[in-house]
Image: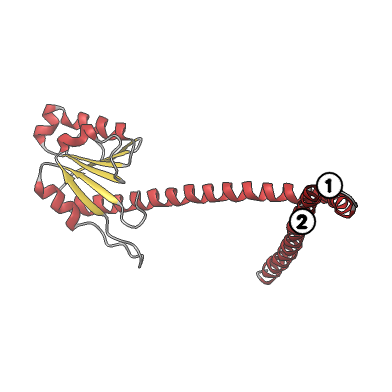
Amino acid sequence: MSMNRPTVLILSSDAAFSREITANWPQDPAPHSNRPEFIVLDEGFSRDLEGSNYDLAIADASSVEKSISGMNKDLKLSLAAAGKPAILVHSDPSLDFYQLHGAVLEMRREAGLWPAIAGLLGREILCRVQAESRARDAEKTCAAAQSEATLGRYMVEMRTNVNNALTTALGNAELLVLEPGLPATVQAQADTIRNMALRLHEVFQRFHSIEKELTVAARESGKKAASAAAGGR
């Protein structure tokens, strides 16, 4: 789904139906919101909706012919199978004005304000879809951050053990480098071990500095939160 420009699929063979929907679609008061992109298809394409890339479908099941032929039921089943939000507009006076069946909202087409009502419902559905998408993205970001935080805590906890091991490796490498009579290749290898151990030691020292910085930041954040809470009383 495009967060900037949602897609509304209008399923109708009646050009007047799609014109009424698009003409009466409400303007969003949010300054950075965009009008949806409308795609008009014959309702016969409803059987191929599964896997289609759209955010909301508005289907026309309002004619007497569609009701008699059973197309209303076919439309409802196709919209439900697609698994995406949909508004099914019918004209059956025996049904309630609104009926919700899973992700499919049925509404009765009556003279007057029905296109504006359909537009308002559609806009609210799109807002909900976008909010759910943002929530899923936030959950993914939070999960990734928690994973990284867990790894960071583990590395901080293991810092002392690693430093002890590095100190031992570094001390032995220093002794080898100073050992007289060693072949040049062995001395070069010992020198490499010493240099790598020093580099790793520097890396873990940086972890120690980061730990201190995070502790100070957490303490300051706690003070600010406590001050804000006290000021709000």
Is 209 on the left or on the right of 126, as rendered?
A: right
Q: Circle 2 sits on which residue?
A: 195
Q: Residue 63 occupies which quadrant of the picture?
A: top left
Percent x, y for residue 195? 76, 56
Query: Observer-nearest residue: 33 or 2?
Result: 2
Percent x, y for residue 7? 27, 50
The structure residue drawn at horizontal position 30% and vertical position 35%, both measured from the top left corner, is: 82
Colour treatment of the image: secondary structure
Q: What kind of residue is marked 2?
A: Asn
Percent x, y for residue 3? 37, 54
Q: Secondary structure at mark 2?
A: helix
| Mark 2 closeness class: few <14, some 14–19, many ≥20 residues within 10 Å | some
Badge 1 vs badge 2, beta-carbon distance below 8 Å = no
Q: Which mark is residue 165?
A: 1
Query: Observer-nearest residue: 191 or 29?
Result: 191
Q: What kind of residue is marked 1?
A: Ala
The structure residue drawn at horizontal position 77% and vertical position 48%, both measured from the top left corner, is: 185
The structure residue drawn at horizontal position 89% and vertical position 50%, both measured from the top left corner, is: 181
Percent x, y for residue 66? 12, 33
The structure residue drawn at horizontal position 72% and vertical position 68%, both measured from the top left corner, is: 220
CA separation, marks 1 and 2?
15 Å
Q: Which mark is residue 228?
A: none
Q: Secondary structure at mark 1?
A: helix
| Mark 1 closeness class: few <14, some 14–19, many ≥20 residues within 10 Å | few
Q: Quadrant of the C terminus?
A: bottom right
Query: Observer-nearest residue: 113 or 229?
Result: 229
Image depth: mark 1 or mark 2 in front: 2
Pointer 1 or 2: first along the chain? 1
Is 195 on the left or on the right of 23, as rendered?
A: right
Is 69 on the left or on the right of 121, as rendered?
A: left
Query: Observer-nearest residue: 10 or 69?
Result: 10
